[in-house]
Amino acid sequence: MTPTTLLAIVLGVSVASLAVAWALARWVLRKDDGTPEMRAISDPIREGAKGFLHTQYGTIAKLAGLVTVLLFVLYAFVRKVSPNDPVGTVTLALFTAAAFVLGALCSGLAGYTGMWVSVRSNIRAASAARRSGNEAIQVALRGGAVSGLMVVALSLLGVGGLYALLYAVYPESFIGKIPLMIVGYGFGASFVALFAQLGGGIYTKAADVGADLVGKVEAGIPEDDPRNPAVIADLVGDNVGDCAGRGADLFESTAAENIGAMILGATLAFGAKQSDGAPAIVAPIAFILFPLVARAFGLVASIIGILKVKAASEEEDPMKSLNRGFAWAVGLALVGFVVATRWLLHSPAAPQAWWHFALCGVIGIMTSWAFVWITQYYTEYRFRPVQMIANASTTGHATNIIAGISVGLESTALPTLVISTAIIAAYKLGTTSGLVNASGEPIAGLFGTAVATMGMLATAAFILAMDTFGPIADNAGGIAEMSGQPPEVRHKTDRLDAVGNTTKALTKGYAVGSAALAAFLLFSAYMDEVGAYMGKRFDSVNIAIPEVFVGGLLGAMLVFLFSAWAIQAVGKAAQSIITEVRRQFRERPGIMAGTEKPDYSQCVTIVTQAALKEMVRPGLLVVGMPIAVGIIFRFLGSWSGRPLLGAETVASLLMIGTIGGILMGNFLNNGGGSWDNAKKYIEMGNLGGKGSAAHKAAVTGDTVGDPFKDTAGPSLHVLVKLLSTITLVLAPLFLA
Amino acid sequence: MTPTTLLAIVLGVSVASLAVAWALARWVLRKDDGTPEMRAISDPIREGAKGFLHTQYGTIAKLAGLVTVLLFVLYAFVRKVSPNDPVGTVTLALFTAAAFVLGALCSGLAGYTGMWVSVRSNIRAASAARRSGNEAIQVALRGGAVSGLMVVALSLLGVGGLYALLYAVYPESFIGKIPLMIVGYGFGASFVALFAQLGGGIYTKAADVGADLVGKVEAGIPEDDPRNPAVIADLVGDNVGDCAGRGADLFESTAAENIGAMILGATLAFGAKQSDGAPAIVAPIAFILFPLVARAFGLVASIIGILKVKAASEEEDPMKSLNRGFAWAVGLALVGFVVATRWLLHSPAAPQAWWHFALCGVIGIMTSWAFVWITQYYTEYRFRPVQMIANASTTGHATNIIAGISVGLESTALPTLVISTAIIAAYKLGTTSGLVNASGEPIAGLFGTAVATMGMLATAAFILAMDTFGPIADNAGGIAEMSGQPPEVRHKTDRLDAVGNTTKALTKGYAVGSAALAAFLLFSAYMDEVGAYMGKRFDSVNIAIPEVFVGGLLGAMLVFLFSAWAIQAVGKAAQSIITEVRRQFRERPGIMAGTEKPDYSQCVTIVTQAALKEMVRPGLLVVGMPIAVGIIFRFLGSWSGRPLLGAETVASLLMIGTIGGILMGNFLNNGGGSWDNAKKYIEMGNLGGKGSAAHKAAVTGDTVGDPFKDTAGPSLHVLVKLLSTITLVLAPLFLA
């Protein structure tokens, strides 16, 4: 296992996966694109999504350009030069800035391509439903898989490629320092992810709330009615929020997790000693590259799983065929994981180590299952929580809201217990692996938690394919309905849509679970990095020190304030579309009469501009606050002779901010999801059904839940990881 | 300044304050108790409150009895005996259990007496309003002052008396260990406070929501209509929630803060050295007893302030006369503080120290002002946030809710910044005071934060008098209205009521602010205590250790889960009163016709039982979780050879739970307060006024806010302090 072999495997699998994505896209695009009536609906969605992405990426590019320059200046001129720098100051600054740009570009590319295919798959899935349910599922899933594969493969290609480049340029002894030089890549990915998820989330809910308030409430026309000028904006929203947003979210997860795990792997591989002081690990490169190889194996497993999805019969529940594919992906990922641990993490000096790490991977996979199960319990109407909310709706709007909020708050408890158990168990498996430092102390605990995270993210490509399946199926349903397809076709697309709702909810549970598990790994990587720059161990974040405690207080506050601003942004952006729809109804009475086509694109443009304007304030808060705290406390620390104070205070902000983000994210996601399904439960004819007083109260809850579960909640997953990557990148700045 | 003199001052002022409270009660009770019509309303309120308190204290007594036995057993048999124990095992166990009982009894006595006077002051204030507005204010405030003085004086008498007792029994050298023996007192106070606030909070909002839903919504009768069987339960609720609940809350604050500050004072006084190794502080007792003396001075200042409240003319805004009294109290407290610091904290070895600490006190007082100001900004309709909610109400229920939640979340930011600044500034003043240990390191930082907390709590008695003024004025308004007083009398009671609403909101800001500032002092005391038992310094809570991080995660989760259960409890208890009111309307049609009197007491009994049943689950969660975490991680720690793991994990749970509690408490209090006033703003005739669609939406928000601001929010202040006192008491158990 020479480094060259390992890198060849990683890069080879990445490129092969991109080729598979390309082939799947070709397969989908070769399908027929439906009737002219269908295209009349689908074309504006495609155009709207394109318009949004162009404008959004334009804004993000400007912000990213600013950050690139800032990053270079901070690294080259502001940072205190340390004798432990991996390379010279300007080289390091250049490389960090370039890695940031590359990370941002790859994330953007993955999001754009996935979206490009997804807005073309929707009409093809709708059209395929005219022939066969199985074909419709395959079109929707393979269309979604393009997004999933692009995201994971590009993330792997970027990290692996950067590593390979630096490996080729620098001498062999340098391999342990390379991860420090590519942290910019993770930050670039996070930066784009934050704005993609936040902007997309604000867009989708502003359009949704705006369309509903003027259409359903004021004008009294049904949902998805072509007379509503905001209806296309609403359908565009499903794509930009779930598809582009969640894609960027998981791109970031996999990139940041890879880099963090490589840093921990390097520390472990060079620190592990035998009792005579000789290195315990003969080939450190195997530990450093293990995360990339394991991810590559997971990618292969996901591809096979995706290709295995096929309905057994026309009548079968589509969820069943998806589950069969997922079972293939999980099973193969497990096998791949065991093979990779035995191959790369086996050390004769610690014969137990490899299977301890394999078990860590199993813990990660079990954790993802537990999260999916808990999410279902709190958000599906088969279970007590959603039924409690539905019952509370019978006594009015207020009791519905109170019930939903209490369910959301309660739903934080079980995931916390699961994550706590997973962290401690994986850590314990790591410490008992037999890998010790020169003093005989176990040092592989953190690497154990890192391996558990890798296990959780092994099937990320499959999960993401299922997630993007959601908006494609949702859009296919809208197209079938608005183009007046016969009932048997609409029955098929409705079934797809229902499955899409489930997969979207599950992915959110998965995303927050992986963020939580990855968090511990990422802040350990941050501390290793600070230690590497200082040339001594940095292993204490002592919140009994007032400044460090205050850092934590500010971190938790950041989560509350960010959530407040994200929610407010939806309200403000919705106001702009309400004004526009009212104007169109007023100035062009033919719209309501059905004789005149509304101006869909004007609505799309307006909500795009509003969403992008509103995302700037919460976005800059997240980016600015850790930097401000780090720099302020760095100077407070250097006055009182504590050079690590800035780094330690930021670590506290990061860790306690992460705790707050995980809990608040769960609260918002699950609260929103349970309100949504309580409404659906009543709409199925329970407790008075559609139009009853209970239904009106349930609609209120659903509307309140929209910005919770589709804007603030998913943005918090990204926030948590962005805090990690930004501190990883800026760590050298916080050292006095 | 011999210990005897200092203790004589403390005990003398406590007893004198109780005498003043008795005299004020006599003064109030000598006032006439109104017309027979008034008594027809007031008598059932008094009876209902008495019934609730008896039942509630019965439940609390049973739970407290259980805890007393448990505490004794844990201390006597389970705890690992340490060579650093202050006294023998059984003596320590007995004393801790006895101090717990005494703390619980004093808290109960203060709450009961305050309530006894308050439910007799309401009718007298209503009756006085027939003669003069000034007299009505004085009756209401002095009635409230009985509660305020009882609370602070009994807290001081308990801590001071226990100290004096132990001082008399044990030798002079023992003075530093006495605080360790009276930690049970603080826990007893917290334990009662939690259940008093939680039970009272559930009661008051269950009655309120229940009365509104059946009365206003179903039967269509106005608020405070005598035909509603739940109307008396609703009026009782104002007393048990705001008066008894908040009284117990601040009793706990002052008791826990006194004990915590004494522990820190002892550590500092014995640890401070001159450069030649001689003690820097010649009379350690002065530092240990300083918190008690400063509190005694504050009590005198509050009494003078209360007696100074007098309307300048009949037309003057009652708030102005309260503010004049408060200014007297603050001014005198400041003078007393400076005198006390100069007298007791001056040390020739550190001539700067006393005025550094005096400045810490000033920081505390400024912090309380800042909190009061921020609370006003977020909850009064003069400012942007409440107006934003009112405007959002015009587009429906959902937008009202979204706006209120975002305002509540946003309102956490400024208080966090204020608290962060106060903690760091007071700590800095402490470290630069010139007091150093044998190695020349500054050690007075934590004592600086303790002194700031003392400054904040100096005027607690006045604040509490204003708070209890609230329910008295509210009840006086209800009695005047329901007994059909002429408009000029009702105008006067309405003005009182409006002022009462303001004072109640301000007290909540004050209570959460003091909880936040006291928190840092209390967990430092916990760490000092653990250090004293272990015989070595314990000064690190390192959240980079996975177990310690998990402790923090669980602490934050506790806050979310507790809030969920507290909110759910209100819903369940409200359901029971709804059923009862519906039954009375159905079985006794004469009630609605006005020919038959409803059975008020049955409603009171039912909601009492329901509230007390529902408080048990969230209450036991708060008490049980830190114990469970401490014991589990103690054993995990002893397996892996880390004797401090249990104590450190609990410290993390405590600190991060505190952060979560402060933020969540602010969110719930301010969110609820802003919804309330948005409704009032619309009711004043804005945006369509009463009966408009906007008003209906605003009523929804107000109802959602009720359990936020009067049940879960205030209980979180208590939770934060209970976590501190429970860990203080059980610290010895967590040591392996």
Image (spheres, coloured by chain):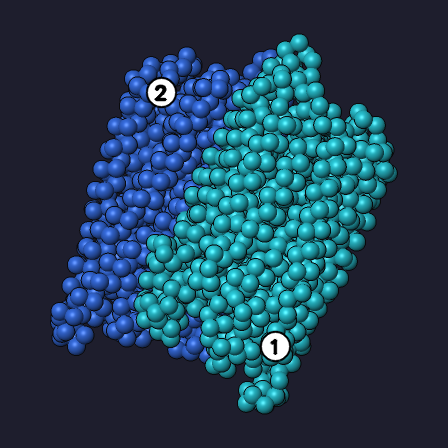
Chain colours: A cyan, B blue
Name the one closer to the observer, A385 or B290.
A385
Q: Secondary structure at mark 2?
A: loop
SS class of the residue under badge 1? loop
- Pick the quarter of the image with the C terminus of chain B: top left
Residue bearing mark 1: A35
Dot label at residue B79: 2
Would you say B442 lies left or right of A182 here?
Answer: left
Amino acid residing under circle 2: Arg
Residue drawn 41% across and 28% down?
B632
- In the image, what residue occupies the spot 73% across and 58% down? A60
- The disc at residue A496 is none
Q: Chain of mark 2?
A: B
Residue A471, quarter of the rendered image: bottom right
- Front-lying residue, A426 or A151: A151
A366 shown above or below A589: above
Give the percent coordinates (x, y) of residue A196: 66, 57
The residue sitting at 64% across, 66% down in the picture is A31
> What is the x, y in percent for residue B663?
50, 48
Is A198 situated left or right of A55 in this image? left
Picture quadrant where residue B250 is located: top left
Tell me which amino acid carries mark 1: Thr
Q: Check disc 2: other Cα within 10 Å, few if <14, some if 14-19, many if 20+.
A: some
Q: Disc 1 is attached to a residue of which chain?
A: A
Q: Mark 1 to mark 2: distance in Å?
A: 78 Å
